[in-house]
Image (cartoon, grey):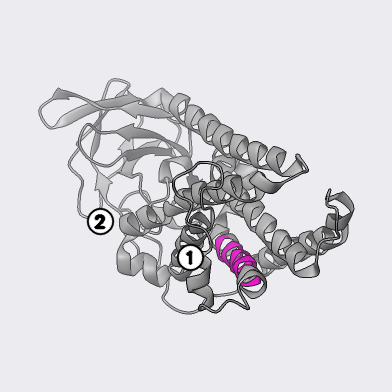
């Protein structure tokens, strides 16, 4: 797989992914519109506009929760990787549902204001001096703006234009959006809710997102990770040959510099940067498929000996020199230029 700057290339997997996602969204909203009036503790029936507003808002909140759960789930169990591959589609649809919620709010609560709708929205509540009744609308607006930026820059054109490190840092803003949505809900809908169901859902959502990230972090800390230490001029001790799984890698953290993935394949060792050229995905968490390092995030591939994507693709990553000191693997911490060939190091006694 590789990147090219053209409209989304639809394939069977993407079509099925989006079809299932859209069906789930439609099913949730229709079910909410049907079940909502039955479970709401209100003295008067909810109007259709308010019910639709709540349906879109709650759906967007749950979708954003799932978006943040996909990453750690994929780290904990590789069976979730197919869900991760098209997570950007998930994010764009989440923004669309959140925008529908905002449009319903504007169209119902501020349609007859003497002020322009957006101005009326911001002037609706200015009680910033007290906790109870603290304005919740600005948190929702800020969250929607963050999601809009992420959706607008989701295509690989922006990934290449901004460079993967900048693009990835920008898209970490999804966590800020989630925090803003939680604040928007806590200061808004939760203040007037008479049914504890919403409070339970919000609490479980926050606990799920936090718990999965803690579990994934612990798994990564206890997994195949090593820290390099200099043992002779120009060389650093990393790990042992026996610690590197066949067709897998050990990730080495350098004191200064990006992490390095040391792979073992066919009785030989090779080292490349741990950062995929596509989205800085963790190559060391991937495996060797058909003789190529395969990124676990989107399947981008690179040859072990030179870090080049197989033709016709053109991506390249940095390579590193290795040597053995007994069973200990030594690494030259100075990266070679992307695409530089480095002869793999044979493992003594290993079957090729």
Q: Compare residues 75 and 101 and report the one nearer the observer.
A: 101
What is the secondary structure assignment of the residue under circle 1? helix
Q: How many marks?
A: 2
- Give the CA distance from mark 1 to mark 2: 50 Å
Of the 4 image quadrants, the one containing the C terminus is: top left
Q: Residue at x 48, y 44 (%)?
A: 286
The answer to whether residue 20 is left or right of residue 80 is right
Q: Nearer the viewer, mark 1 or mark 2?
A: 1
Look at the image and tell me whether residue 81 can be seen.
no
Q: Compare residues 86 and 187 and report the one nearer the observer.
A: 187
Where residue 252 sits: x, y (%)? 32, 33
Q: Compare residues 11 and 33 and report the one nearer the observer.
A: 33
Q: Residue at x 42, y 73 (%)?
A: 4
Where residue 164 sits: x, y (%)? 34, 58
Q: Residue at x 31, y 57 (%)?
A: 166
Q: Residue at x 31, y 62 (%)?
A: 163
Question: In the rendered structure, does residue 81 fall within the stretch colored magenta?
Answer: no
The answer to whether residue 213 is left or right of residue 77 is left
Vertical arrangement, residue 215 with respect to residue 307, above or below = above
Look at the image and tell me whether residue 152 can be seen.
yes
Q: Compare residues 89 and 93 and report the one nearer the observer.
A: 93
Residue marked by disc 2: 338
- CA neighbours of label 2 inside 10 A, class few (<14), some (14 to 19), many (20+): some
The answer to whether residue 58 is left or right of residue 221 is right
Where residue 195 sits: x, y (%)? 78, 43
Where residue 338 sits: x, y (%)? 25, 56
Vertical arrangement, residue 85 with respect to residue 263, above or below = below
Snapshot quadrant of residue 105:
bottom right
What is the secondary structure assignment of the residue under circle 2? loop
Q: Which residues are magenta?
A: 91-104
Residue marked by disc 1: 122
Q: Residue furthest right?
A: 38
């Amino acid at each position: 797989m590789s990147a090219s700057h053209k409209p989304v290339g639809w394939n069977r997997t993407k079509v099925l992914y989006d079809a299932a996602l859209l069906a789930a969204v439609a099913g949730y909203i229709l079910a909410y519109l049907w079940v909502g009036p039955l479970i709401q503790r209100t003295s008067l029936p909810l109007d259709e506009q308010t019910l639709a507003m709540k349906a879109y808002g709650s759906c967007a909140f749950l979708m954003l929760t799932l978006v943040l759960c996909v990453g750690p789930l994929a780290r904990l169990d590789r069976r979730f990787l197919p869900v991760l591959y098209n997570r950007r589609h998930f994010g764009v649809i989440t923004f669309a549902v959140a925008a529908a919620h905002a449009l319903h709010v504007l169209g119902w609560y501020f349609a007859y204001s003497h002020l322009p709708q957006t101005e009326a929205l911001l002037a609706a509540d200015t009680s910033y001096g007290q906790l109870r009744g603290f304005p919740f609308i600005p948190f929702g607006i800020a969250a929607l703006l963050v999601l809009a930026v992420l959706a607008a820059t989701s295509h690989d054109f922006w990934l290449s234009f901004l460079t993967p490190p900048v693009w990835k840092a920008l898209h970490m803003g999804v966590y800020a959006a989630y925090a803003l949505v939680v604040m928007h809900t806590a200061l808004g809908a939760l203040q007037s809710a008479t049914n504890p169901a919403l409070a339970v859902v919000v609490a479980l959502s926050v606990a799920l997102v936090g718990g999965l990230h803690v579990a994934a972090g612990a798994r990564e800390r206890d997994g195949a990770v090593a820290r390099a230490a200099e043992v002779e001029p120009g060389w650093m001790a990393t790990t042992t040959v026996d610690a590197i799984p066949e067709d897998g890698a050990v990730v080495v953290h350098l004191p200064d510099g990006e992490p390095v993935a040391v792979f073992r394949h066919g009785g030989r060792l090779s080292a490349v940067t741990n950062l995929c050229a596509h989205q800085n995905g963790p190559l060391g968490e991937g495996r060797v498929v058909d003789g190529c390092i395969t990124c676990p995030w989107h399947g981008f591939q690179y040859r072990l000996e030179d870090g080049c994507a197989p033709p016709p693709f053109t991506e390249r990553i940095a390579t590193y020199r290795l040597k053995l000191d007994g069973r200990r693997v030594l690494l030259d911490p100075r990266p070679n230029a992307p695409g530089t060939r480095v002869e793999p190091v044979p493992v003594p006694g290993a079957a090729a």
